[in-house]
Amino acid sequence: MINRSQLFQALAERLQESRAVAMLGARQVGKTTLARSYASANNCAYFDLEDPQSLESLAQPMTSLNALLSQGRTVVIDEIQRRADLFPVLRTLIDRYERSAQFLLLGSASPLLQQQSSESLAGRLSLVSMGGLALAEVMEDGQALQAQAAELWLRGGFPRAVLASNPRAAMRWLRDYLSLVIERDLPLLGLNVAAPVMQRFWRLLAHYHGQTWNAAEPARSLGLSEPTVRRYLDFMTGLQLVRQLPPWHENLGKRQVKAPKIYIRDSGLLHYLWGIADSDALWQHPKSGASWEGFAMEQVMHVAQPDEAYFWATHAGAELDLLMFKQGLRVGVEFKRVDAPRMTASMHIALQDLKLDALYVVYPGELRYTIRPASGTSTGVAVEAIPLTDLAHVRANWS
Ligand SMILES: Nc1ncnc2c1ncn2[C@@H]1O[C@H](COP(=O)(O)OP(=O)(O)O)[C@@H](O)[C@H]1O
Ligand SMILES: [Mg+2]
């Protein structure tokens, strides 16, 4: 078992603060495993709505759940998207008892579920999203090893892909995973599209990974309308399988890019779609850099947990890979897969135009160093190179 103690801790804290918590995430990221360990450590009642016996014991939900809550127990309900009709019952019970940690709900993060839960449980539910394994979770002594980082990049973060006996087995698992999502989950979650069309849509996503997405071109190549393609993209984003990074726009009198950038969040899934099954092939692949950037971006987002995130680009060629807002601060991040990053013209422009409070350059090396000190510069902001395997510093500046 891979120890996910940070997540466990975060979940426990969240439950202590809220009457109800919903932990949402893509299938197979490890939600059930984490919730079961929480449940057994805290004597919770556990219902799995894909299990007929659990369903039966919730035939009279108000009575049975009330009995458990009145004993002071926390109730875990897994695969909640199967019984959205339970939400009104949950709402009544949540309002009846004032204590925290009444319910932990788990499910696939479909747009439909988010809508239903926010309508029925408005203001009562604290949402936690869960992804696959992050680099910060496989670290030893606060730092990840280069070899671990390379392996996680190749295979992605689904525990089953991480634990597969070799990378080829991981890729086979990812192939089956995607088929299952397309053929079984999407229809259950309300997206009814022929499987071959969805397979082609995913290949297109892989093609555009790390690039701006103008719906027109993908729509044309799939023979679908633009709104349809946009709906598919939003759906995959809701499932947390895809990240859409919106463009930041500033009143500068400069023309700026207005389409979102898209990323397949799990690097293993991306590599499967690209037909890559080992490290050599990954390094030699012409889009290797785009994959590394996406992987690094997910790791930064995991560590930094920003309030908002964007990219920025002008038509004149200046750009910033990631612009994060948190606690009123503006932090820029550039991803550079080079041995020793230096200042670039684009960084100077981003610092000036966007009035950044900090600028980090994340790179695959081993040392943290100052690229440009704060003193004696017009913006008074230091630029630092941060190893991908030592991202803790990005968070340290906020906490
Ligand atoms: N921390 C972990 N260490 C090892 N294997 C894990 C871990 N978390 C999940 N898994 C494995 O990954 C698979 C998916 O986990 P599961 O908890 O069922 O995910 P979900 O509920 O999100 O679909 C299972 O085979 C499980 O055993
Ligand atoms: Mg599960």
Image (spheres, rainbow, N blue to C red):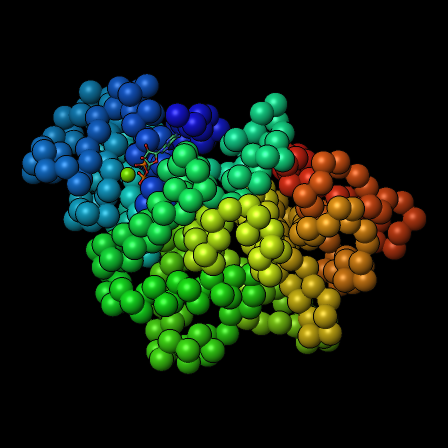
Residue at position x 47%, y 78% in the image: 217
Quadrant where the C terminus sits is: top right
Quadrant of the picture in which ligand 2 is shown: top left
Q: Position of residue 63 (x, y in %)?
A: 10, 32
Residue at position x 41%, y 47% in the image: 171
Q: Would residue 286 be seen by someone viewing this image from the given angle?
A: yes
Q: Of 80 and 215, which appears nearest the observer?
A: 215
Q: Position of residue 176 (x, y in %)?
A: 31, 50
Q: Is residue 130 left or right of residue 119?
A: right
Q: Would residue 24 be seen by someone viewing this image from the given angle?
A: no
Q: Position of residue 111 (x, y in %)?
A: 33, 57
Figure disc tally: 0
Residue at position x 57%, y 40% in the image: 150
Residue 146, quarter of the rendered image? top right
* Above or below: residue 340 compared with residue 264: above
* Above or below: residue 173 compared with residue 35: below
Q: Is residue 181 left or right of residue 381?
A: left
Q: Of 193 and 338, which appears nearest the observer?
A: 338
Q: Position of residue 398 (x, y in %)?
A: 65, 38
Residue 182, quarter of the rendered image? bottom left
Residue 352, quarter of the rendered image? bottom right
Quadrant where the N terminus sits is: top left
Residue at position x 47%, y 49% in the image: 277
